Image: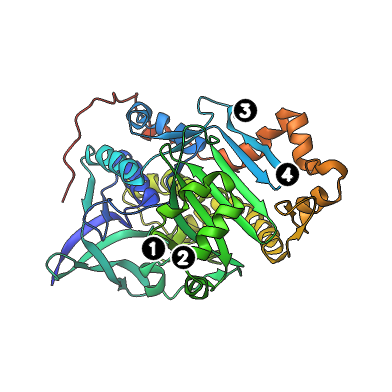
Amino acid sequence: MTNNERTTCLVVGGGPAGLVLGLLMARAGVETTVLEKHGDFLRDFRGDTVHASTLTLLDELGLGERFAALPQRRMESVQVQLDRGFAKLGDMRRLPGAHQHIALVPQWDFLDLIADAAAAEPTFTLRRHAEVVDLLHDGSRVAGVRYRDRTTGTEHEIRASLTIACDGRGSRVREAAGLTARAFGVPMDVWWFRLPRHDDDPEGGVGRLSAGHFMVMIDRGDYWQCAYLIGKGTDEQMRAEGLAGFRDRIAALVPWVADRVTDLESFDDVKLLNVELNRLRRWYADGLLLIGDAAHAMSPVGGVGINLAVADAVATARILAPALRSGGIVGPGQLRRVQLRRWWPTALIQGAQKLAHRLILRVRSAAPRVVDGPTAHVGAVGMLDEVDRTAGGALPLPLRLANRFPVLQGIPARLVGIGPLPEHAPAWARRPATPAAQERTPQSS
């Protein structure tokens, strides 16, 4: 076992939060090591949304031009399709600032961009194939980690002044520290799959609601990234009902994609996301801090998880980097400052997600009934109730108001695109714009 490694700030997890944190700490002059258990970022991510708040951060870091050069699709609006038709729910073009859209970028490209920028800093190291197996302690204080090299199987120890866990909702660090998150019950899981997109399809994001069914479709250019909500724990049962039945269900729910459902050749094309919503009561221990999904797993509602985790990373660096740079010990009181800063926006978003879950549960449990023909199904809850009650099939009141007064479409756009308490790069981390054509810097091994 190799046990002579040491760093000042040890970041576990090379996702968006971990790499942004590593970049910021390194720009502060803090010796920083990021451990990533995979050898690269080429995996099937579905959380590929980069919201306006994060786009602004990239500008501040001097990376906006390079990010803009990445292959991407821009989402400027979100629509909802009820049984009575389409209505616009949110208009990103009403956001303040330079970025009035959500960027849909393969996450591996985003991570490579941040990792390359961090590798240009002399105090940054990225260790790949490094899987954390346990924590190291100095008395009661966390003093680093023991990790396994997944290519050789050898174990190593790396000691650190501060360890920060950014290793996701299945956090190994959280488990090793004996921290347990408070779980908020969720009524659904998600099936992810793709369907081809045609040029005459709607643009942007489409939410499809009908009694007993809820699906979100994200415009990725040549295909739709689809999220179909199923009852919590019903994955095995629904798969047993057969692929043909699922195809028929999608074709009935969204008739304008009925000619493409045969592209789902097997259930191998349908991936399960086990939805969780939880939050640690305390995000830290002596020598240890948890942020992002390691501290608070988010529901996919709104697609805000990545951007919330990045905001955690920015706040963490701004609050803790000065003490780490001066060689001081970061005590629990300073770690608590990070949690106090980021707790209320997290709790606010999770509260909104819980409300959305309750609506979804009611929509899914509503029995469809027929009005004015065999295909005119309406729901029995919330705004679907109002569609049912309103003579002539008018839109629900919230959507009628949003379509009559388009300025109101900026409210949901701001909640999703910017969110509460957006974080900005500290002055010491800012750089002039970096040309997109700049050659990539070799990354540390």
As measured in the structure, the alpha-carbon distance from the residue carrying label 2 to the one carrying label 3 is: 41 Å
Taking depth in this image into account, of 260 and 387 the one nearest to the observer is: 260
Taking depth in this image into account, of 318 and 71 the one nearest to the observer is: 71
As measured in the structure, the alpha-carbon distance from the residue carrying label 4 to the one carrying label 3 is: 26 Å
Instruction: Kindly check if marks 2 and 4 are in contact, taking CB atoms under 8 A apart as contact.
Output: no
Q: Earlier in the sequence, mark 2 or mark 4?
A: 4
Which quadrant of the rendered structure holds the N terminus?
Answer: bottom left
Quarter location, residue 119: top left
Relative vertical location of residue 136 with respect to residue 252 in this rendering, above or below: below
- Residue under pointer 1: 266
Relative vertical location of residue 394 with respect to residue 44 in this rendering, above or below: above
Q: Tell me where residue 48 appears, x and y as whole percent.
A: 42, 46
Instruction: Kindly check if marks 4 and 1 are in contact, taking CB atoms under 8 A apart as contact.
Output: no
Residue at (22%, 62%) from the top-left corner? 130
Q: Earlier in the sequence, mark 1 or mark 2?
A: 2
Relative vertical location of residue 159 with respect to residue 180 in this rendering, above or below: above
As measured in the structure, the alpha-carbon distance from the residue carrying label 3 to the one carrying label 1 is: 41 Å
As measured in the structure, the alpha-carbon distance from the residue carrying label 2 to the one carrying label 4 is: 28 Å
Question: Mark 3 is on which residue type?
Answer: Arg
Residue at (78%, 59%) from the top-left corner? 380
- Residue under pointer 4: 84
| Closer mark to the observer between disc 2 and disc 3 | 2
Q: Which label sits on residue 243?
A: 2
Instruction: Kindly check if marks 1 and 2 are in contact, taking CB atoms under 8 A apart as contact.
Output: yes
As measured in the structure, the alpha-carbon distance from the residue carrying label 1 to the one carrying label 2 is: 7 Å
- Residue under pointer 3: 94
Question: Mark 4 is on which residue type?
Answer: Arg
Q: Which label sits on residue 201?
A: none
As measured in the structure, the alpha-carbon distance from the residue carrying label 4 to the one carrying label 1 is: 32 Å
